Image (cartoon, grey):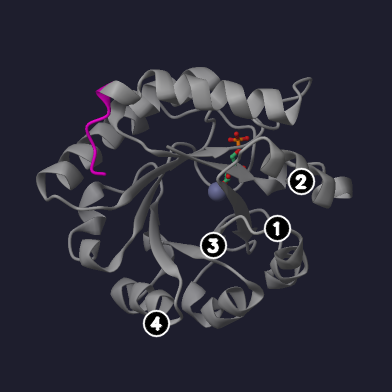
Amino acid sequence: MIISASLMCADLTRLGEDIAALEAAGIDWLHFDIMDGQFVPNLTFGPDLIGNLRPVTKLPFDVHLMIEEPIRYLDRFREAGSDIIVVHAEACGHLQRTLAAIRDLGAKAGVALNPSTPLSALDYVLDDVDLVLLMTVNPGYAGQKLIPSTIPKIGELAERLGREERSIILQVDGNVSFENARLMAAQGANCFVAGSSSVFAAGLRRPEATRRLREAVEAVGATWRGPE
Ligand code: DX5
Ligand code: ZN
């Protein structure tokens, strides 16, 4: 089970301190939500922030690109220190080429699907990915409500990955609360993007919230039926 903390939900005035606290709490990855104001209505960070933070931690950087034609920026994000680069299937004119380019740069390649994008979008690219990200809200903003139809979709993908014996990480992103994380884990998700609904929830300390989320997903780990 991998927990990836979504830094757009951190205290941006104290990002270094938040990262140190999360690292001490045993977080697995750091998740960067990169938005371009086109693919999604919001704007967030660019590669310079990633480059600035790279020296402060050894944690893997999981970079979720919500940008049109991300192939234009892959080298910048890789040079800045991204370890896992995730692109949206909906944003790539040449998805396979984009995923292959990520691996050519030496990073792990991920493909993300919006809630309404069918799993068939993955049909001809599963050989090219290390991770599939299923969005459980429409990308663009933190603090949104889960879209219920995305829950059985997780199970359908986990079943397919298991049947095809693929070692692909199944990541979920959007309203991963303690309660929703249990439902997602039960369907076969094994990588959880933790934002304002859990690790960064108001009134909770980061280490406690991190432990609580891990306990929630590990409690249902026994029923997990995805690949290793
Ligand atoms: C949404 C982002 C998420 C978001 C998750 O577009 O991709 O990573 O920050 O945070 P919450 O828990 O607020 O949904
Ligand atoms: Zn994200």
Is there CB contact under 8 Å for labels 1 and 2?
A: yes
| Element class at badge 1 | loop
**Front position in the image: 42 or 23:** 23
Q: Residue at x 62, y 71 (%)?
A: 81
Residue 20, numbered label: 2
- Where in the figure is residue 108, as x and y percent of width and height? 42, 66
Is the C-beta of the residue carrying label 4 under 8 Å from the nearest atom of ligand 2?
no
Is the C-beta of the residue carrying label 2 under 8 Å from the nearest atom of ligand 1?
no
Q: Residues within 10 Å of mark 2 (few under 14, many from 20)?
A: few
Q: Residues within 10 Å of mark 4 (few under 14, many from 20)?
A: few
Amino acid bearing label 2: Ala
Q: Nearer the viewer, mark 3 or mark 4?
A: 4
Q: Residues within 10 Å of mark 3 (few under 14, many from 20)?
A: many
- Separation of disc 2 and disc 4 at Cα? 31 Å
| Element class at badge 3 | strand
Label 4, on which residue? 104
- Separation of disc 3 and disc 2 at Cα? 24 Å
Residue 162, numbered label: none
Amino acid bearing label 4: Asp
- Separation of disc 3 and disc 4 at Cα? 17 Å
Q: Nearer the viewer, mark 3 or mark 1?
A: 1
Q: Nearer the viewer, mark 3 or mark 2?
A: 2
Whether residue 129 is in magenta: the answer is no
- Separation of disc 1 and disc 2 at Cα? 8 Å
Q: Residue at x 61, y 79 (%)?
A: 79
The quarter of the rendered structure image containing the N terminus is top left
